[in-house]
Image (cartoon, rainbow, N blue to C red):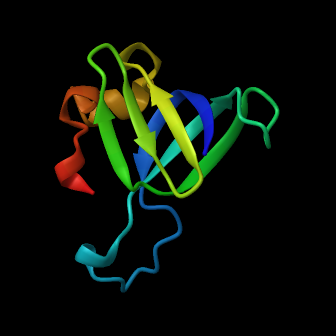
Amino acid sequence: MNKATMKNWSLTHGNAEPYTAPELLKCKLQGNVYGHPNHTDGTFVVTSSIQTVMDCGTHKVIRTRNTDYTVCPKDIDPEYEKVYSNAFEKLNLSDY
């Protein structure tokens, strides 16, 4: 399992078709990745579907198919936070 840090992060449903039923939409993490073996630091990526979210107190680890991404509340995309206030606190396993 790869490990990386995501900055300027937010959640997305990626390239969902307009007629996809809401319950079939897969949530993904997006942002600038650091420390990933396959990407240059700062590269914008959209991950594969979120599998689990582990709350570690000061940060959370979001597991996708191949990578564990560390996210911190200070690194959330400010525009995303404006729309979805307290997004870090609301990020939990039961949503995925």
Of 92 and 3, the residue lying toward us = 3
Q: How many marks?
A: 0
Name above or below for residue 30 compared with residue 66: above
Residue drawn at x 35%, y 71% as measured from the top left = 25
Name above or below for residue 53 compared with residue 64: above
Residue 46: percent from the left, percent from the top? 59, 51
Residue 6: percent from the left, percent from the top? 55, 30
Quarter of the image that includes the N terminus? top right
Left/right placement of residue 15 relative to residue 43 reads left
Residue drawn at x 63%, y 32% as measured from the top left = 32
Left/right placement of residue 24 relative to residue 35 reads left
Residue 62: percent from the left, percent from the top? 42, 40
Quarter of the image that includes the C terminus? bottom left
Residue drawn at x 43%, y 53% as measured from the top left = 12
**Quadrant of the rendered image containing residue 57:** top left
Residue 80: percent from the left, percent from the top? 38, 34
**Quadrant of the rendered image containing residue 88:** top left
Left/right placement of residue 14 relative to residue 38 reads left
Of 16 and 37, the residue lying toward us = 37
Residue drawn at x 50%, y 62% as measured from the top left = 14
